Image (tube, rainbow, N blue to C red):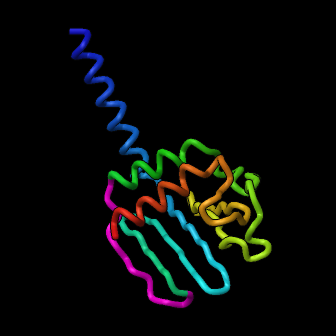
Amino acid sequence: MKTIFILLSILLVNQDCSTHLNQEQMSVVYNASSRGSYFEVKLENDSVSINRQRGGTPEIKSFPESLKDKLFLEIHKIDVKQLEDFEPPSENHHFDGAQIAYLQIIKNNKTYQSKNFDHNNPPKEIEAIVKEILSIVENIE
C-alpha cells in the first residue's frame, strides 16, 4: 500500500511541475555572431525559430513538449534576475577569436540578458541552458 501511495505521489508531483512549466510564459533567445557569421535561435510557445543569416528568413519548426520541459527545468535552476551578473570564462570575442554570443530570457514580459560571451564557452551558471538550446537545434533539424 505504501509503495502505491509513493508512486502516485511522485506521479502527481511530476505532472504538477510539468503543468506549471507549460503554463508559464517564457521565451528564450540565443544569439552568436561575428563579422562573417550569424546564428540565432528563438524558442517560444510551441515553436523554434532558427536563423543562420543576418536579415534572413528564419526556419520555424515545432518545439516538442519534452524538449521544452527539459529546457525550462534548466532555466528554473538559476535566478534569471542575476543573468547579467554571470561572468564569462573567456573573452576571445573581443579580438575576433570567437563568435560573440548572448542568452536572453523573456519571462513574464520582463527581459533578462547575459553579458556577451564566447560562443560554445558560456558562463558556468548558464552552460547547461546553452547546451540544451544547441541540442534542441541539432535534434529538430
Could you tell me which residue is drawn at 33 percent across and 51 percent down?
66
Q: Residue at x 62, y 86 (%)?
A: 36
Whether residue 104 is visible here, answered yes or no, is no
Q: Nearer the viewer, residue 78 or 130?
A: 130
Quadrant in the picture for residue 64: bottom left
The x, y position of residue 29, in whole percent, is 55, 67
The magenta stretch is 54-65
Horizontally, residue 97 falls left or right of residue 74, namely right
Of residues 79 and 25, which is closer to you in this image? 79
Residue 121 picture location, percent across and down: 64, 58
Which residue reaches farthest top? Answer: 1
| Left or right of 34 in this view: 128 | left
| Residue 23 shown left or right of residue 129 in the figure | left
Q: Position of residue 8 (x, y in %)?
A: 26, 24
Residue 75 in view (yes/no): yes
Looking at the image, which is closer to me, 24 or 50?
A: 50
